[in-house]
Image: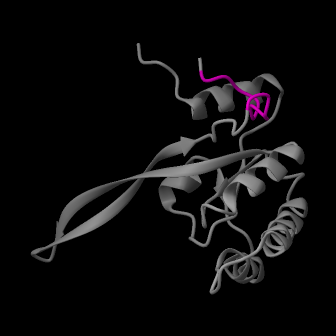
């Protein structure tokens, strides 16, 4: 019998609390069919444009800019808080720690998608295809920091 993944533990924890696992997609990417099966929902097209703008950096940001971007992303999440229990995030590494912490403070679980690259042949050409494999929960950043609702044991 295989050990449960962190994602499976999260799903089980939510089921015990009487909640379904619905994951809001807060990335620049369209939800894949594989992710939809896992419960990922997409933002509206207007929200997607706003998310892309907030996640794209053309210059080096200062702390104030990072804070404004995180708050802008949180404003989108807040509108969907009642319909989801987790948020799929991804983007600039310097933005993610603040974003994941603030998402957790909203009572939602931040998750990162994990994809595996596979080389496939299509029309006689080899191409790299990324397949969704599951989700990864962030590790607490600081001792005593948020544990995001589950244990890595």
Residue 82 image position (x, y, % from top left):
90, 51
Asked whether, in this view, residue 29 is left or right of residue 151, the answer is left
Q: Quadrant of the N terminus?
A: top left
Q: Which residues are magenta?
A: 143-152
Q: Quadrant of the C terminus?
A: top right
Identify the residue at horizontal 56%, vertical 42% (top origin): 136
Q: Is residue 53 left or right of residue 146?
A: left
Is residue 148 inside the magenta stretch?
yes
- Residue 59: quarter of image: bottom right
Q: Does residue 18 show up magenta in the picture?
A: no
How far across and down, in percent of the image, does residue 5 sit? 52, 28
Res 53 quadrant in image: bottom right
Q: Main secondary structure of the magenta part?
A: loop
Residue sticking out furthest to the left:
124
> Residue at point 62% right, 86% down?
58
In depth, the one of 86 and 102 nearer the eye is 102
């Amino acid at each position: 019998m295989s050990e449960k993944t962190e994602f499976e533990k999260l799903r089980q924890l939510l089921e015990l609390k009487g909640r379904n696992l619905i994951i809001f997609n807060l990335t620049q990417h369209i939800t894949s069919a594989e992710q939809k099966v896992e419960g990922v929902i997409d933002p509206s097209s207007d929200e997607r444009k706003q998310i892309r703008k907030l996640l794209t950096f053309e210059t080096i940001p200062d702390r104030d800019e990072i804070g404004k971007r995180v708050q802008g992303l949180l404003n989108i999440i807040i509108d969907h808080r009642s319909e989801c229990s987790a948020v799929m995030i991804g983007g600039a590494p310097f933005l993610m720690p603040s974003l994941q912490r603030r998402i957790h403070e909203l009572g939602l679980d931040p998750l990162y998608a994990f994809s595996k690259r596979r080389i496939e042949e299509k029309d006689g050409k080899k191409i790299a295809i990324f397949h969704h494999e599951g989700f990864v929960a962030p590790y607490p950043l600081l001792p005593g920091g948020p544990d995001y609702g589950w244990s890595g044991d």
